Image (cartoon, rainbow, N blue to C red):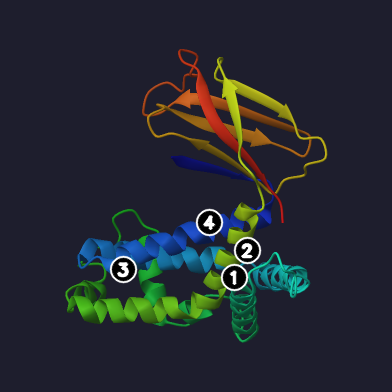
Amino acid sequence: MIHYEYPLSERIRTLLRLEDLFERVDAFTASPEQPAHHAALLTLFELAEVAARADLKTDLLQELDRQKAALAALRGNPLVETDTLESVLAGMEAAHQGIHQLPGKVGQHLRDDEWLMTIKQRACIPGGMCEFDLPSYHHWLHRHVEARKRELHAWLAPFAPIRSAVEIVLGLLRDSGQPEMQHTDTGSYQRMLESRNPQLIRVTLTDVVPCVPEISANKYMLNIRFVHAGGGQMRTCTDQPIDFDLTFCTL
């Protein structure tokens, strides 16, 4: 199954971007290859840019506070697993404290590193990171793989509280909705949202369906157009019936 997610607020859009970047930097860092570590460093620069939003820390702290209060009210409920609840609350508290202790903008440690900023400036130029442009970076790429990994992990470590908070908030958001089976014969689907006011819409398709959903929505209406996957013209999938799961998620 393939999940396609569509955020309906800038805040959730930022959290999804951060989640994607964290997953990417992990995959690149785990590889021993030089091109993968090059990609990991570029992804770290993207992380710093996305996480530098002035309201990110405030938004995450407020959401963690709100969710902690809601979950803490479930203590003593016989229908709630106590150990699981306490584990989730402890994770929220740890993320909350970690964000509180972050000085300045998220990713400032990268901006304070003159060598990294020189690389970032050259990275904006197509083909601008050749060995004759950045000999010191060329030398870094030829260091032992474990030495490169240690530095990448060290540069990533200050993002840990933000990452924990993002995982918690998105996890709670995704768990808030129940999938509903839907069907279309025309390749298009429309639905009034009425009072749902979702923050995230998820469309789930089996991977054998050669179509992808193009989702657009506002607080009143949801529109999904299924188009053929791959290159060429973006054609609506009118040649086959499509079954999919639709989930509305709200914190």
Residue on which disc 3 sits: 29
What secondary structure is marked by label 2?
helix
Q: Quadrant of residue 12?
A: bottom right
Residue placed most toward the observer, 96 or 25: 96
Q: Quadrant of residue 228?
A: top left
| Mark 4 closeness class: few <14, some 14–19, many ≥20 residues within 10 Å | some
Residue placed most toward the observer, 99 or 142: 99
Distance between mark 4 and mark 3 Cα atoms: 18 Å
What secondary structure is marked by label 1?
helix
Distance between mark 4 and mark 1 Cα atoms: 14 Å
| Residue 122 appears in the rendering | no
Q: Quadrant of residue 133?
A: bottom left
In this rendering, the label closer to the viewer, 4 or 2? 2
Dot 2 and dot 1 residues touching (CB under 8 Å): yes
| Mark 2 closeness class: few <14, some 14–19, many ≥20 residues within 10 Å | some
Distance between mark 2 and mark 1 Cα atoms: 6 Å
Q: Residue at x 31, y 68 (%)?
A: 29
| Mark 3 closeness class: few <14, some 14–19, many ≥20 residues within 10 Å | many
As shown in the figure, which amino acid type bears the numbered disc 2? Val
What secondary structure is marked by label 4?
helix
Residue 137 in percent (x, y) is at 26, 73
Q: Of the residues under marks 4 and 1, which one precedes in the sequence?
A: 4
